[in-house]
Amino acid sequence: MAKIELTRSLFVKNTLKSRYPQLAVFIVMLIVYIFAILAGLIGTPVGSHNFSIVFVWIAWWAILILIAVPFFGRGWCAVCPIPLPGEWLQRGAVLSPPDKRPKWLNLRVPKMFRNIWLQNISFLLLALFSSVLLTTPNITGIVLAAMLFAAIGLSTVFERRAFCRYLCPVGGFIGLYSQTAPIELRIKDKQVCVKCEGKPCYNGSQAGYGCPWDVFPGGLTKNTYCGLCMECIRTCPHDNIAVNLRPFSADLAKPSTRMDEAFKAFIMLGSAMIYASVLLGPWGTLKDAAYNVGSSAWFVYTFVFLTIIFGILPGFFTLGLLQTKDSTPLKQRFASLSTALIPLGLMFWVAFSLSFVLTNASYILAALSDPLGLGWNLFGTANAAWQPMLTSILAPAQTLALVGGLIWSARTAQKAANEVKVSSIPVIVYCFIVTSIMLWLLL
Amino acid sequence: MKRPELLTRILITVAIVGAVGAPLYIWSRTPLIHAQMSENGGWSPDVLRAEVGKPLHLKLTSDDVMHGFAVGQMDMERVDVEPGKVTNITLTFDKPGIYTFFCTRWCGLNHWRMRGTIEVNDSSSDPEPASIPLYVSLHLDIDAPHDAASIPIDQPSAVRGQELATDLPVDLSAEYYRSHSPYQAFNDLANTALTDSQRWDVVTYLWQLNTSKESLVNGKQLYVQNCAACHGENGAGNGVFADDLKAAGDASAQTMAGAQSMTMQTPANFTDPTRMLGASPALLQGKILRGGMGTGMPMWGSIFTDDQIWDLIAYIYSFQFEYHK
């Protein structure tokens, strides 16, 4: 399927070039975000009725993992309010053209941190505390506030969106899975970029700011680190930036060679399986261990969690790779072939999320009407009873997602294996085994 | 600064101040009464104030599990307080005094500690002085053992007792019933020609005479709502919290008074004839009114009315006696 350039439409292009539509969305998102922090801190401690829990971990998560990431890639990052206050502070402006002199320290992020290892760690930290985080409003409020202030702090020390690019716990996996999305921002003609003086898309101009994501659009080959902020559309003097519709998983034809991204795939795959066991499984002891943060059982859970993610899953994957003899270095094969786990991981998360989103979606109605738990009934739904939704289609939908993910991954494995000229069979077998385990956990 | 930039900054500032300020303002002006399990703090606030004749509007919410709300010695429907939801209730007091509000759901081991007070003032009159309870005027030591020295071999019968009592000089008055234990009444019949079994039948008749069907129904309802959690629905001291109470007693015994504390934490067994036949209604009134010092038995004096306590006592005796057959 050929690409379709959406920005050929004048309406789309002008909407993206203008700052005002995006600004309007930003302001609304920022208000909702701040409200979520406050609701977490002053609202009812009962998670199922608190706006912060219901809207962040049910509504937002459902939109993110079931719609935004699969269909829009980093679409969420395009409207995320977390970096905004820091970015406005960093720029000293909201709309005005950038000053030539930076207002803050404007340091470059040290090279050792210019990867997604910090994002891997921040995601794992949230994952390990998730049982408490996902159910305790004030913890959610504190974490949301901490992310906002961390983004502000990093903006005053480092250049561009250091938080989004290197620390955001969700940014890492959104970037990884955005490679599968049928949307991309790319240049139209490479030669135009080569000849372009001053590279305003990266360095900024009177028309707008240099890429907040520290990406030179001229070199973009995959979605992973493009935050779809649309700054380059505004700054490109040659109208050489396009937003395209494209086939799903187009980026995966070019396998990654980075270990931080490879391990991200394992972290996401393993986390989905462990979450399915803890949150949906029938094992009370496991649930207790995950919930009792700080207890000895929790430390055992943490050890097992990390062992599965950093030992067992990549270990068996490596053992599979060792079954085929090849001159390509193992590290390169490992990194390249782990690309096959990206669609599978995404589908694991889709299948897992369907369970708890459909089970808990009815809480959204009650939380909408009484977001702070003060006895309001704004939309007449404050007393809406908890009612799992679409339970009859849940198991078929999950099966479809997992089997579809397996087929998608097998196809990706074949392409990645061709790139590094090795057999794809061990990876396909690996995907089959983990998919079977996930099916057993969910159904 | 250009005009759009200025306007945008003003808009963002207003939006942020509004997003922070509006919820805080509304929240600070909505006084909620929070219910939590006793281990987490109970009612908050736990002291309320009201004026006689002026409606007191309360907004109740639970921060953890399902609780209930009622005010002691007040004719009102108990209401549920659900987690994360707000229950509105309006109370109007016609007499000054200190009222006790309490949780009406078995929310946890220390459920009975979930209490608070409402201080109701009336500038025109003083609170009525409380009457002295019977167990006080009888100088009963309600903490001392009052076990019956002997108990019936078979289940006594009020029907048989009624036939036997007609020719006997038995005091059938409420005063006698309330101030004597069944065993004392049994002893008072020692000078008659009745066998032990027949004397217990007469005692049973005496107890039935002072126990109406209505009081049994009321007493059962009170018992099921308030007592069965520890004492068990069948009165055997084996309610759903009994094991937890014993475990708590075991734990406290390590630091407190040893075995005595441990046994005191076990809910009383109303099916035990030695204990129950040695206890007078006045003694039971004292236990219920004041509660068991140092045990898990709460004081109910501020919650139950006198009539409710007598109804409850009548029902508790039904674990020993066969009535109305």
Image (cartoon, coloured by chain):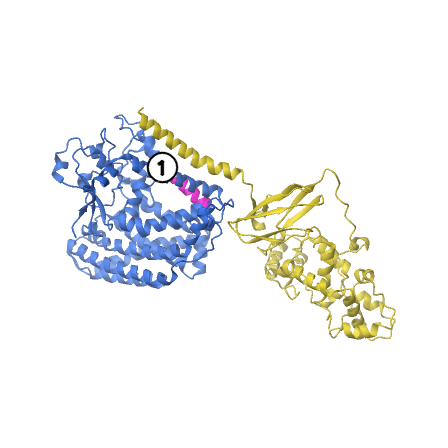
Chain colours: A blue, B yellow
Mark 1 surroundings: few (<14), some (14-19) or many (≥20) residues within 10 A: some
Q: Residue at x 12, y 34 (%)?
A: A195
Is A424 magenta? The answer is no
Q: Which residues make up the magenta segment?
A: A135-149
A16 vs A379, left or right, is left
> Mark 1 is on which residue type?
Ile
- Nearest the viewer among A90 and B75 is B75
> Which residue matches tag 1?
A27
Q: Position of residue A345 (x, y in %)?
A: 29, 55
B245 vs B183, left or right, is left
Q: Residue at x 37, y 48 (%)?
A: A60
Q: Main secondary structure of the magenta part?
A: helix
In which quadrant of the rendered view does residue B138 lie?
bottom right
Q: Position of residue B226 (x, y in %)?
A: 64, 58
Q: Position of residue A412 (x, y in %)?
A: 21, 56
- Nearest the viewer among A23 and A90 is A23
Residue A323 showing in the rendered view? yes
Q: Is residue B1 above or below residue B148?
A: above
Is A138 magenta? The answer is yes
